[in-house]
Image (cartoon, coloured by chain):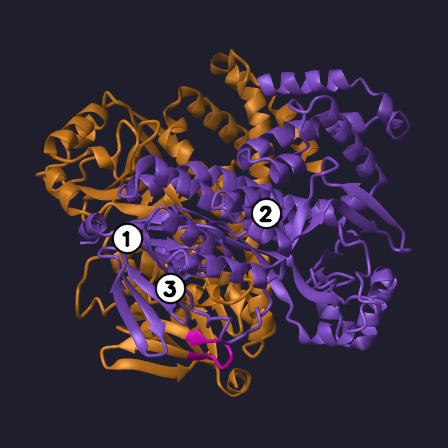
Chain colours: A purple, B orange
């Protein structure tokens, strides 16, 4: 039944009107397909609501821009974004060190979820997609593609010939797939949670810190970060273990506890946060989940974005990866046509799964780098050596962070090459005099070692 | 609310009247607790039904017997069980080799699910547990411990102060827990499925093969096994990849395909299976799942058995491990008392989780041994060397299989020691003349190496 409908109609149902669902709808409309997007939440334009703990700020980087550029949205999005050219690391005494992300002009862009999502939703609607809010997806019968929504008017059933699940880390479409046999699934929470806080503009209405950097207060087992907003505030995110550590959410129970932690570890930030106490005890403490699953396809339904691969936020790739999903799915639709969904979805999951596994893994590993390694002076030397290698041999040696953030090579390939480079760099850094000698290394020899390692 | 009820009443709700749920009910009744067991299936005594693809035969070993012995059930179960003293390996030409599982008198016991389950259910009822069939658990509110069942008379709600989920690999209690934040969960299907077949008794009413062995036809990527039944038949299980291999379920579509596979690979068994064709195309092909999750506890609810750790069947430990869960949970109830469920459940999951992770992993690894290694002549030499080590130094060297099957040392400890032994044995087996020299090895030196490795 689904199949026949499919032949007759090019009706696509997208679940989730978040960033990924709306961008996918834009791509599909550009392919001339009928698109209806469903979201359980109300229309924010009519009923403003709180994100309820979902992260407010994200870092848009190359893969994201590429995917937006493909549908002509780069110029519209740019005004919402603030470039961050590197990490500004704050030590415990208020001193800071700047570490570039890449070459001089390479940046990642701080962007706020709310306005960005609205821009994409309006763009999708402008192109003819319909967005139906307050439609909560309940279940799907994969035999006949009948889906059930809960609406204010009660349950609604309808046939959806093709379903794209962009309904996030707690995807209801994925839950439906999980009831099917031979669905592999894994969800893992890390021991840390997070809480969002604010550094408002100064009394003069200016940014309280350098706006063109991602600020980090790395403290070993925990950290604070801050990203700039167009209104000249910063959104800060505090990452702490939930429990069982010297500094953890469980042990901050009153204003005195909070003061003690912030004055001891984040004193410079503390003085920029007049609303700390109110915000800390009002804002939710959220958990961080990693989700991996396979297959992503069942019948004429496919998962993408966080629905199929929710990652922890430490590589800043969750949204970029989801946007790249849209880009790649669209490429496959162009290649195989709009009537070959079985083939398109199958090719999509086969191609994409190794890459999303790699970025999930990288995101997990980068948490240690962010909260710990960046505070190590040797880490800066390491970054300098890699930057110089990249400058001298731009094609042969690309630092892992750059491969992930400033190129669109497959994440799995970046991961593999990154591991080779890491092994070589570990040996380079083992030299006890590296701090003095780093500039005089035999850089060509390092490149030769990498080429040899790659050839194995 | 749950807590107050808990103080007043010692009412325990067990979900699942399978092997684990009924044994747990027996333990709880012996502690003087009120026990009600719920199962979605009808009472088999009134409405016989098909297991629908669930494995019929299991291998009861030391941990299982110990757990049954603790509640005085050993003598009642023994008549249902047939000892298997080793593996009888069938080669492609009909030749067989016998490999002992352990010492001469050590055996694992073939037992059929149906009668065994009935014995345990009746024992639980005899001791005063109530079993309510046709009660399908739907959900629980962890705030107030209110559970909802679906029954023939419609939905039924009730308060359950303490809930023990022994509802199997597809546990509904676990599904309810999975909706809670910070629940780690993983389900993985292996690429192989299985199908059950039968070797009936001979025309003379005798066993068609040696009944005191577990028969294996190892064929590298796939295998057939057979376990004896008290009615003198054997239950055979065919393990094949679902698809994508030379021999796989997907490529057996008619009787000619089936004949071809069985005549080529299992010819001796083929001649003992008059109903092969009927059974093959009538019986379901089932999938094999591995499930790991954590925590196992939420409020006053705990998971045990397959509900918290479903494993693939290749170590014959699924049931034994579930029974040991009951034994250990009971030990903790005895230690901390029947009014300390929070403490008992917390201690239970902390103590047990590393062990169940280890046996899940071992079960996965043993599939390769069963379907492949046992056919290697060097494997037999290896087993002989290990048996001799164990004979000479019974406490110092216990083969991994024996630690798992014939002792009750923690699975995690067995796993760790097994890995040390494996590394040492790999070196021993690397001697190109090992087949000739195995009996003349310096066995004390091997033990010394193990002691050194352990000390590190």
- The residue marked by circle 3 belongs to what chain? B
Going by the picture, which residue comes out furthest to the left?
Answer: B203
Q: Are marks 2 and 3 on the same chain?
A: no
- The percent position of residue A406, horizontal first and vertical second, equals 63, 37
- Up the image or down, B39 lies above or below A10; here it is below
Mark carried by residue A67: none
The answer to whether residue A87 of the structure is visible from this angle is yes
- The percent position of residue B383, horizontal first and vertical second, equals 46, 28
Secondary structure under badge 3?
loop
Q: Residue at x 69, y 31 (%)?
A: A422
- The percent position of residue B37, horizontal first and vertical second, equals 36, 73
Horizontal side, residue A314 vs residue A297: left or right: right
Q: How many C-alpha atoms fall within 10 Å of the one at disc 2: few (<14), some, or many (≥20)?
A: many
Horizontal side, residue A278 vs residue B357: left or right: right
Q: Nearer the viewer, residue A277 or A407?
A: A407
The answer to whether residue B128 of the structure is visible from this angle is no
- Up the image or down, A357 lies above or below A232; here it is above
Q: Residue at x 77, y 77 (%)?
A: A254
Disc number lying in front (1 or 2)? 2
- The residue marked by circle 2 belongs to what chain? A
Mark carried by residue B54: 1
Q: Nearer the viewer, residue B59 or A88?
A: A88
């Amino acid at each position: 039944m689904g199949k026949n409908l499919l032949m007759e109609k090019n009706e696509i149902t997208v679940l989730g009107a978040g960033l990924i669902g709306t961008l996918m709808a834009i791509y599909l409309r550009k392919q001339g397909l009928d698109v209806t997007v469903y979201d359980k939440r109300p229309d924010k334009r009519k009923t403003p609501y709180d994100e309820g703990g979902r992260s407010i700020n994200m870092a848009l980087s190359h893969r994201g821009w590429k995917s937006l550029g493909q549908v002509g949205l780069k110029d519209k999005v740019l005004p919402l974004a603030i470039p961050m050219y590197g990490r500004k690391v704050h030590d415990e005494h208020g001193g800071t060190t700047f570490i570039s992300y890449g070459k001089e002009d390479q940046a990642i862009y701080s962007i706020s979820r709310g306005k960005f999502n609205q821009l994409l939703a309006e763009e999708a609607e402008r192109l003819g997609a319909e967005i139906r809010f307050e439609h909560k997806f309940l279940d799907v019968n994969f035999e006949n593609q009948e889906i059930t929504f809960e609406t204010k008017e009660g349950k609604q059933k309808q046939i959806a010939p093709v379903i794209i699940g962009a309904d996030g880390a707690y995807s209801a479409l994925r839950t439906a797939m999980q009831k099917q046999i031979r669905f592999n699934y894994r969800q893992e929470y890390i021991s840390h949670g997070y809480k969002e806080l604010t550094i408002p503009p100064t009394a003069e209405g200016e940014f309280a810190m350098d706006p063109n950097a991602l600020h980090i207060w790395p403290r070993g087992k925990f950290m604070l970060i801050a990203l700039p907003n167009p209104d000249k505030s910063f959104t800060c995110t505090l990452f702490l273990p939930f429990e069982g550590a010297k500094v953890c959410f469980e042990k901050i129970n009153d204003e005195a506890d909070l003061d003690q932690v912030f004055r001891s570890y984040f004193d410079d930030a503390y003085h920029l946060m007049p609303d700390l106490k109110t915000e800390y005890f009002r804002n939710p403490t959220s958990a961080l989940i990693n989700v991996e699953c396979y297959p992503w396809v069942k019948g004429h339904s496919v998962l993408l974005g966080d629905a199929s691969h929710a990652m922890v936020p430490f590589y800043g790739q969750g949204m970029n990866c989801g946007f790249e999903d849209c880009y790649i799915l669209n490429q496959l639709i162009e290649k195989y046509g709009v009537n070959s969904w079985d083939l398109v979805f199958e090719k999509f999951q086969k191609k994409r799964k190794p890459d999303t596994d790699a970025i999930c893994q990288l995101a997990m590993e980068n948490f240690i780098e962010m909260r710990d390694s960046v505070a190590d002076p040797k880490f800066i030397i390491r970054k300098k050596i890699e930057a110089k290698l990249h400058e001298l041999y731009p094609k042969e040696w690309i630092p892992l962070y750059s491969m992930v953030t400033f190129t669109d090579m497959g994440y799995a390939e970046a991961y593999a090459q990154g591991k080779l480079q890491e092994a070589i760099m570990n040996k380079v850094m083992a030299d006890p005099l590296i701090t003095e000698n780093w500039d005089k290394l035999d850089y060509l020899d390092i490149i030769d070692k990498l080429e040899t390692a790659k050839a194995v």
